Image (spheres, rainbow, N blue to C red):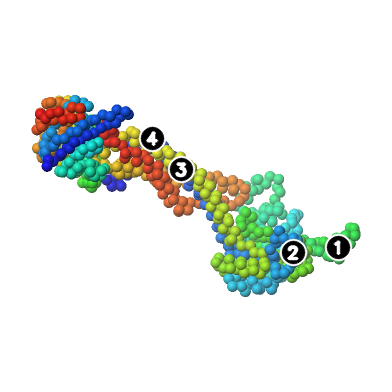
Amino acid sequence: MAFIEIDHIRKIYRKATVTVPAVNDMSFAIEKGEFLAIVGKSGSGKSTLLNLLGGLDTPTTGEIRFDGSNLFAEGKDGLVKHRRHRVGMVFQSFQLIPNQTAAENIELALAFGGVTRAERKSRALELLGQVGLAERADHYPTELSGGEAQRVAIARALANDPDIILADEPTGNLDTQNGDIILNVLQDLHRQGRTIIMITHDPDMARVAQRTIRMQDGQLMDTL
Amino acid sequence: MTTLDLIRMALRNLWRTRLRSSLTILGVVIGIGALISMVAFGSGMEKNVTDAFTNSGLFSRITVTPMKLDMNRPLESLTDTSGISVALDDDLLDKIKKMPGVSDAFGEIQQPAKVRLGDHETTLTYTGIDPEVGKTKAYQDLLAGTFLTDDTLGQAVISTDLLRRLKIRIDGEDMERAKKKDTANVYTYVHAEDLIGDTLLLSTASFNPMQMMGAMMGNQESNPLSERTSPLVIVGVREVDHDGPASRSGGDLLIPEGYAAGIPSIGFNSITEFLRKGSGGSDKYATIQVTVASPNDLTPVRKELEKMGLNVFALAEQMKDIRRAFLAVNAVLGVVGFIALIVAGLGIINTLLMSILERTREIGIMKAIGGSEGQIKGVFFGEAAVIGLVGAIGGIILGWLVTLAAGAIINMKIKEMGEAPVDLFFFPWWLILGSIGFAIGLSLIAGLYPAARAARIDPVEALRWS
């Protein structure tokens, strides 16, 4: 039994009269501690797959099993728990809440995770320290550079100590230098034993992964 | 995520859109302010009326008059004395005094008369009353002098209202203003004390049946009614509030009952009384005032008196109707305020929906990092609750200021008219707490739909939102 088992997963979007199969019958497994890159053209279903893995979306048919239990079996409550404790998500456009400081963005995730108010502040500073941004704690997202904002987002993804980091084109909005920094952070997290699943369209980025899978038209094309 | 976290977040989010938030809150402030001042006005009216009744001691009072006059019965039956004719005389008074639950009872003689003081005269109904009655609560309103002291002497206790009709005004704090308004110099202004010892002339009419025939024969000299004048010494001046419940016909001039019995009079007050004169006993008193020991005795005593065939009037029983009427008034006033609040509620819904639209992406982020539907609902409920709470507190302050201002203006007018100022508005504790609870409740109801909508937002869609 693999750590994550994707089993005949299918996600069909219905828009007006057209039905679009974003993910069309995919099956593969991911091992614990693996660094997996997913590549593919835009519209190939990468993001949909990642959203399904993150419990943000539910499949039309099929299962995704984490440690043998189906993520979608417990309904909404199961998905909330999954998002809260098992995965941390990082997005291309950082997705920080604009009117909250770096520390507060992380504190919000900690609050959802049930961390007491007294602990949140020190935990947030600790997490910012891990990504080298302790001194930027009281800055608002607009006052941060893209690379800094993405590091804050990664710190937030780590707030409730998840085993899995899901990153959707984390370097897509960054220059090469900042992109490399983010990649280094992700590699560090991998070395700490976390499972990293990263979407990218940059073959250079994919090279740091242990395994790269290519998607096309919602299906698994090949493994590199 | 604790409630405190939600409230902090709510305050923050409301602060982010201060102008819109304050306009929404202002809507609640006006709604609650309207509700509160309306209900406070109704409560104030009710309180003034019920307090006046309570203070006058009239709640423990039953007024007994001779018989039940049923207008639907043919006139002949008025003389039918079987079972209903009980004369209001000393025997009856003694009987009533001995009844269980009765603490006291006194008879009142009432007759129409003409009074003259100085150069002016007026007509009224005077009351012959036991001087002992002066000890009761209802007559503790003397401005000067004493109550009647001797049952046999020609004494008089007069009211300020009677004095006014005699073109005399009592010197008081608003004297200067009253004088200024009295441009035609109609009134004489005196101190109440100065009237004590003055003589009041009481003219009564008496009926002489012997002269009746002559008058009917067309003899101009034969007048069956003759006038007699009795001098009365003023011993006391009462302030009678004619708008209050203590006002009763006959209260303007009180004379000792014993003395009143000796004044020749027409002998009856009404046609029914006249008609009954031949058949039943003779009524010595126009009314008998019964005071019960406690309010609980009122109903049994009233029933007992009714059984005796007497006509009974108890203000306390009327009070139920008055209270019911005020309940209706308060309900109508409340509805007006309620409508204002409904509008405020719509404002809250509008504001929250706007805010959800603007924060769609933020809601998506919250979901992505582990926020549950319940917590997201909580965020918007928190905002609704804060709007409600702040609005309620503001509304109470606004309502209080409005009633303060309105009360001051109205009392200014009342003072100009020479009347005593009144508290027009009353804020019972239930109104304050109730309106806070109501505002928060309403806000939460207004928040129901927006919060549910926020919670249902699809995070995948929301994160794509820009």
Q: On the rendered structure, is B463 left or right of B233?
A: left
Question: Residues at badges 3 and 2 in contact (C-beta under 8 Å)?
Answer: no
Q: Indicate the amino acid at tag 2.
A: Ser
Which residue is found at the position 64% from the left and 59% from the top?
A: B238
Give the residue number, with chain letter if any, for mark 1: B212
Q: Nearer the viewer, mark 2 or mark 4?
A: 2
Marks 3 and 2 sit apart, C-alpha to C-alpha, by: 59 Å
Q: Secondary structure at mark 4?
A: helix
- Residue B324 appearing in the image: yes
- Residue A156 appearing in the image: no
Give the residue number, with chain letter if any, for mark 4: B19
Q: Indicate the amino acid at tag 1.
A: Met
Q: Viewer-proximal residue, B31 or B135? A: B31
Question: Residues at badges 4 and 1 in contact (C-beta under 8 Å)?
Answer: no
First in sequence: mark 2 vs mark 1: 2
Query: Residue B271 is drawn in which quadrant?
Result: bottom right
Q: On the rendered structure, is A201 left or right of B161?
A: left
Give the residue number, with chain letter if any, for mark 3: B341
Q: Secondary structure at mark 1?
A: helix
Give the residue number, with chain letter if any, for mark 2: B77
Same-chain status of marks 3 and 4: yes
First in sequence: mark 4 vs mark 1: 4
Q: Nearer the viewer, mark 3 or mark 2?
A: 2
Q: On the rendered structure, is A173 left or right of B441?
A: left
Q: Nearer the viewer, mark 3 or mark 1?
A: 3
Q: Secondary structure at mark 2?
A: helix
Q: Nearer the viewer, mark 2 or mark 1?
A: 2
Marks 3 and 1 sit apart, C-alpha to C-alpha, by: 73 Å
